Image (cartoon, coloured by chain):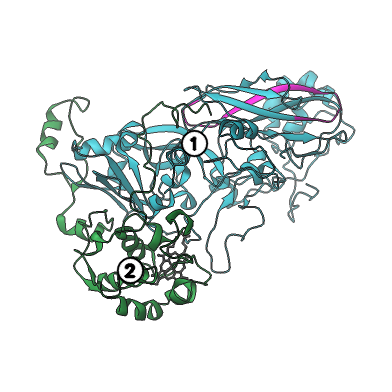
Amino acid sequence: MTSKPPVRIGIRAPTNPIEIPKTRREFFKTGATLAGGLTLASGAVLPALAEGGHDHTMAAGGHENESPMILGSAELVQYGSRSPFEKSVRIPHPAGSTASPDTFGKMFHIASPIGEFHGTITPSSLHYVATTRQSYMPEIDPAKHTLTIHGVVDRPLTWTLADLKRFPSVSRLHFLECSGNRHGPQNKNVQESHGMTSCAEWTGVLLSTLIKECGLKTSAKWFVAEGAEEVKGASSMPIAKAMDDVLVAYGMNGEAVRPQNGYPLRIVVPGFEGIFSTKYLRRIKIVDRYYMNYNDYGHLTETPTDAALRYQIGPKSIITRPSGSQTLAGPGFYEITGLAWSGGGAIKSVEVSTDGGASWKRAELKSAPQRMAHVRFSCPWNWDGKATSIMSRCTDEVGQKQPTLEQVAKYWNKPYVKGYTMPGLNNSVMPWTIAQDGRITNGLL
Amino acid sequence: MVSFRLAAVALLLASPVLAETYGIGRQTTPEELKRLDISIGPEGDELPVGRGTVKDGEALFEEKGCVFCHGEQGAGGSAPALKAEKGPEAPIWQRGRILPVRAPFATTVWDYIYRAMPLGIEGTLTADETYAITAYLLYVNKVIPESLVLDKESLPKVKMPIGKNYADLPDWKPKTPRLKGYPY
């Protein structure tokens, strides 16, 4: 925050061909004719000028540039980077656990800075990463990589990446979420509590298209997807899911899927726990029974309730701003904003409470909610300067509602006490406590 | 490579929308599949030929370095325990998440070791070695007697202590709540 912009030796502001107005007021009077000329100068100047019609005390006036100029570089030309002022980074998950990479270069779970994002799409560089266990990433040459589908099909087929790109493609927004995305009273901020989910635009071929190419036999009930990492993670999934909406993706947010996210090919299993979305996809086997591979054994539970709740993800929402570890500047207007998603489909509505859950207001959804995708919500709020707590809850298209932890305990006839953990992936309401001095902390028991 | 299927010819004549397939990709050969397919189902159909004894497995558990991470007899190491503290007298769900004990099929144990261990040099075990190590780990957990030799025939027949005492996954359908009757 406090760091200075990097001043590069020998940088000179480009000579401006037009005369820059002395004050902003003057600029706004003559702005229309000057704007075109101003774009020739650095972009660093323009936003400051455009931001309002009055002079800030901090703003430099006169004919001098307010900020040092960034010298163009091959790096910035070829593959842009964010401003050095932007500092949000991923962190180990759970917070305080082994940092990635470890001394051997292995990767563990890393959480996305979900509190820093705008809109709905997680930048690929900041997408959360989960590994079946600590693992290396395979460096796969896409020219040599193939995908094979076999098993109870009429004909097993193998495709190169170039082959796959010839099929009709789809691009869809989908969230992924790790089953370890469980918020608790120990989490200081929203990255620690909710950072193991992200949302990207995935591009690829529908798995159903590829399976139809092989010819599905009627005895097919499940499919097993296998990756090329060292553990060759494999999970059994229902064939109904494969024929519905599973994506074999080579694209992520407009470019190739990133290595940490499964380059060059992965499946995206919308709405299921993250582990099902096999990375580094190389083989899919269509089978007539549950295959009980290692990942399936990991999902083994004693009761049908646990089995169901550790599969498709429930409706969930979280206020990302204002949230834990942030401080409100003082009473006045704030836009409360956050994300909502569900494994059951599109989000239908989000509600926000600013009085500790006593009353709820319908939030605005910032875009048309997509199925199994994050949607950004917001709610205008005038903080009166009194201590309170804020929280959000959502409902999805099939009518599932996001519960409070207390409601879940009640449903299962369990005492609602400190440390109560709900069955399945935790999709309960997360309250943020706001103190009189504006400081925001975790509002859980 | 061009597909040899007749459908590809049909595709040239019909519009792609009406065609049954796109004719993209090549048929995978049986030899390729044999090499690629390491998914071992509960019936063990995919298991390769080979055999292994508990005694061989005990030696291999040392030789292959398993003991460094998993500890003596698979207990007390830095990696997950492979030997349950509680014996067969304890109820299965109280014996811990120990693969050679809790797995519903012995094939799951074999499949995992073959594809994913030893950590760092995965995929270096032979079929014989995997049969032997699987036998050893099942033996230290009192799942099989010391005399049982594991191979393609005997491995899928091993009766795992969990039996059918675990929940099946729900019959998943699109656009349905995750658990019937559960409002959340």
The percent position of residue A348, horizontal first and vertical second, equals 53, 21
Name the chain letter of the residue that bears numbered label 2: B
Q: Which chain is green?
A: B
User: What label sits on residue B134 in the rendered view?
Assistant: 2
Residue occupying the point 40% across, 80% down = B62
Instruction: Choose between A231 and B132: the one closer to the eye.
Output: B132
The percent position of residue B98, horizontal first and vertical second, equals 44, 61
Please say whether residue A91 is one of the residues in the magenta stretch. Answer: no
* Residue A230 visible to the viewer: no
The percent position of residue A183, horizontal first and vertical second, equals 63, 43
User: What label sits on residue B67 in the rendered view?
Assistant: none
Figure quadrant of residue A97: bottom right
SS class of the residue under badge 1? loop
Looking at the picture, which amino acid does disc 1 mark? Ile
Q: Is A38 on the left or on the right of A434, as rendered?
A: left
Instruction: Choose between A95 and B130: the one closer to the eye.
Output: B130
Residue occupying the point 48% across, 61% down = A135
Looking at the picture, which amino acid does disc 2 mark? Thr
- Please state which of the two labelled residues, at mark 1 or mark 2, is closer to the viewer: 2
Q: What is the drawing colour of chain A?
A: cyan
Region of the chain picked out in magenta, as a range: A370-389
Q: Quadrant of the C terminus of chain A?
A: top right
